[in-house]
Image (cartoon, rainbow, N blue to C red):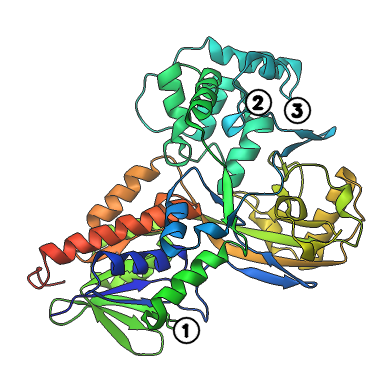
Amino acid sequence: MTSRVLVVGGGVTGLATAYRLGTLDPQVDVTLIEATERTGGKLQTVPLADLELPAGADSFLARKPWAVELCTELGIAGELVLPGASGAHLWTRRGLVPLPKDAPFGIPGDVGDVLRWPGLSGAGRRRALLDLLKPKRRDDSDESLGSLLRRRLGDEATDLAVAPLLAGLHAGDIDRLSVRATFPDLERWERWQGSLIRGAQAANRQARRGNAGPMFLRPAAGVERLTRVLAERLGSQVRTAAPAAAIVGGVSRRWQVRLGDGGSLEADAVVLTLPATVASALLSMTGREEVKELGDIVYTSTAVVLMVYGGGSRSELPDGTGFVVPRGRAPMTAATWLSNKWPTDAFGTRAVVRCFVGAAGEEDVVDAPDDDIVDACARHLAALVRLPDRPEQAAVVRWPVSMPQYEVGHLERVARIRAALPPGIFVAGQSYDGVGIPDCVRSANEAAAAVSTHLMTTPTQQEKVP
């Protein structure tokens, strides 16, 4: 009997999982269901003025190889392009200052650069230098990102210089985020070099010796090109407007996925690439108390503010790709100069800016009316650079309860969740294994491999599903 696998969720993880299952075993019957009318998840564009602007990620980290490898496999590696600008700025009370160069994770690897660390007081710089003298931590347990940074570099460097960059990637609170689940290199630096500054210095040496290559890439047509090609490859295997309502034990030792329209699908294995809270609700009828821990993964809400200014405004933007903001100092957590970072003829001489709002503990701004959010961001931008007080056109895209928070102990929690899942049920994606596109692709690859092993070892003889 042909094995059937059902992938629930049509974002990049779900699409990559379904695709990878087909490459591992073309004989497996794979179906992907997506609740909405379109696939791609948060990788989508929004029409504004005469442009199509990214509402989700605008690129992927090239030094994590999985997304680039998938593009190569799909035949679109030749479409990958570099950003048109590099370098970013830090918001300070005195205005925007360039982030240090050769500073992995925002941490300078040179004593002289620490002494010139922009945005910090003299006392803050001297405190950061104590990182070179402080003993390394002996405890082997997980700790928060904030705990590590404050212990090594002090509060000022942590809050004003490093956290804006690192916490912003997760829209999180550094004093709750797990360093091991978010930036494990920092923990390794302390253990390896006994210092974050020396760790940054060693990382720079390794990068120079290894010819690290570009940091960020994307298809010229945008990152959603990746999900469109995946969906095209899957073709009729994809069903949109098909929300899953529950998962229960089916007949013939299979799982049954009940759909919102009253129908159902049966499968030998089910891969859930949805937010963990949604996966928890779907599995509530399996009778497994252990899967309730899925619902303990915390999420925060964010929004993206897209703004298009008038002709001639692009020249007013500083060099670089944008800026990051210390927690609570501005209505946005970061901003990207899209017209610098990804220049196209369609932008012309217009400044096109994307601001990010909302983070753990700051979700209330996402609930404000669109006009209020746009006004707050635009006024703050106008105070930083010579842009008009209001863009010619703007749009707000909200992502409610969308960003998982990898709190201390996250890796252990995920391991417990996966160990407790019933045979034939798998989870993958942003909730568990990393928030970036390459991490989602890696998670998809690993889920597909686990499903393939499950089907090979228990094709028809698995124990009766409870």
Asked where in the image residue 242 lies, by quadrant, the reply is bottom left
Asked where in the image residue 344 lies, by quadrant, the reply is bottom right
Q: Are marks 2 and 3 in contact (CB under 8 Å)?
A: no
Q: Earlier in the sequence, mark 2 or mark 1?
A: 2
Q: Which residue is mark 1?
A: 241
Q: Which residue is mark 3?
A: 119
Amino acid type, callout 1: Ala
Under tag 3, what secondary structure?
loop
Measured as percent of width and height from the top left, residue 203 is found at 50, 26
Asked where in the image residue 47 lies, by quadrant, the reply is bottom right
Q: Nearer the viewer, residue 13 or 181?
A: 13
What residue do we see at 68% from left, 70% from top?
46
Q: Residue furthest left?
A: 461
Report the Cα–Cα distance between label 2 and label 1: 48 Å
Measured as percent of width and height from the top left, residue 296 is found at 40, 54
Asked if residue 280 shows in the view, the reply is no
Q: Residues within 10 Å of mark 2 (few under 14, many from 20)?
A: many
Q: Which residue is mark 2?
A: 157
What residue do we see at 41% from left, 58% from top?
429
Measured as percent of width and height from the top left, residue 284 is found at 31, 69
Q: Earlier in the sequence, mark 1 or mark 3?
A: 3
Q: Nearer the viewer, residue 68 or 53?
A: 68
Report the Cα–Cα distance between label 2 and label 3: 9 Å
**Would you say 412 lies left or right of 162 here?**
left
Amino acid type, callout 2: Ala
